[in-house]
Amino acid sequence: MKKMLDGKVIVVTGAGGGIGRDIALMAGVNGAKVVVNDIGARLDGQGHDDGPAERVVQEIRESGGEAVASLDSVADPVGAQRIVQAAIDAFGRLDGVVNNAGILRDAFFHKMTEEEWDSVLKVHLYGSFNVSRAAAAIFKAQQSGSLVHMTSTSGLIGNLAQANYSAAKLGIVGLSKSIALDMQRFGVRSNCIAPFAWSRMISSIKVDSPEQEARVTRLQQMTPAKVAPLAVYLLSDRAAAVTGQIFSVRNNEIFLFSQPRPMRSVQREQGWTPEQIADHAMPALSASFHRLDVSSDVFTWDPV
C-alpha cells in the first residue's frame, strides 16, 4: 500500500523534541526521507547539543525509515542553506519543509529588552524566511513543493508578556500568504498551523492562579502527536489544492482560522474632521471592535 509521503524528502526544523519530533517521526512512518534539524538549544535559545537531532534520526531508522541529522541554525541564512543542502546531499531532492524551530524569551512589553525581541524574531520569523527562501529555488525548478509554518494563537489572538513571540508568529502568517501568492504559479504551496500542544515551548506558562492551573491541566492533554497528522497531510499530494490557509489543531479538533477582512465601514462625502470621527465614525464602528482577548478567552471549552 502506497504511503502518503512515499518518495518525498522533508526537512523539519526544531525536530529534536516536541511538535517537530512528532512531525518528523510521522513523516518517516508515512514514507518520507527526513532531515531532522535541531541545534539542541535550551528553551531560551542558549546552548548547543547534537543529541536531540541524532536521537530522532535513530528513532526514524528503527521504525524502518531514512533520516539524517542537521545541526545548523535556522537564524543564520548560511545555516539555512546548509539545512536544505543536507536534503540534496543525502537524498537527492527536497519536497517539503516544516518551519517549526522556535525559542521563547517572555517578558512584559515595558520590560522587554532589544535582545529578547531580536533573538525570538531571528529564530521564528527570520528562520522561517531563511529556510523557505533556501528551498524556493529548488521548488521553483521542480515545479512543486510544500511549506508548513508554525504560527500561534499568541499572534492570531493575543497573549500576555509575549510581544516578541506574538509579533513573530503573526509575521509568519503574512510570510506564508505571500509565499503562497508568489509561488502558486510554480506549484508551490504554503500553509500555517497554530498548534495547541503541551511541549517544552509552552511548559514555561506561569501557574499563579487556580484558573491557570486548570488551563495547564487541559493543555497537558494535548500531545504534540495530535498536530503531526495535519502537517503530514499538508506535505502530501493529497493537499495539492490547499494553500494560503491558517489551521489550528487542539487535541482532536482541527480549526480553519479566518483572515483579516473589512467588517464595517462608515463614509462621509465631504470627508472627516477629527471631531466628526469622535462623534459619529467611532461610535458606529465600535460595535464591531475586538476585545483584548487572549487565547483562553476565545477557546473557552475543554479540548475534545
Image (cartoon, rainbow, N blue to C red):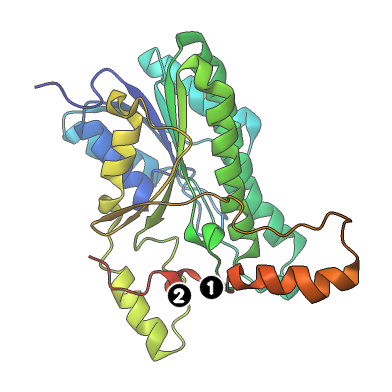
Marks 2,1: beta carbons within 8 A = yes
Which residue sits at x=59%, y=59%? Answer: 166
Q: Residue furthest top?
A: 141
* Coordinates of residue 296 in the picture (x, y in percent): 43, 73
Residue 138, compared with residue 303, is above or below; it is: above
Q: Say whether residue 74 is visible.
A: no
Res 104 → quadrant = bottom right
Instruction: Give the residue at mark 1.
Output: 293
**Residue ID for mark 2:** 297
Q: Quadrant of residue 15?
A: top left
Q: Residue shown at 76%/60% (left/top)?
A: 114
Instruction: Say what amino acid the circle numbered 1 marks.
Output: Asp
Q: Is residue 219 left or right of residue 70?
A: left
Give the crowd class for mark 2: few <14, some 14-19, many >=20 residues within 10 Å: few
Q: Residue at x 30, y 36 (%)?
A: 232
- Seen from the viewer's position, the closer of residues 206 and 78 is 206
Q: Is residue 244 left or right of residue 285?
A: left
Residue 103, given in percent of the width and then of the height, sits at: 54, 55
Q: Amino acid at mark 2?
A: Asp
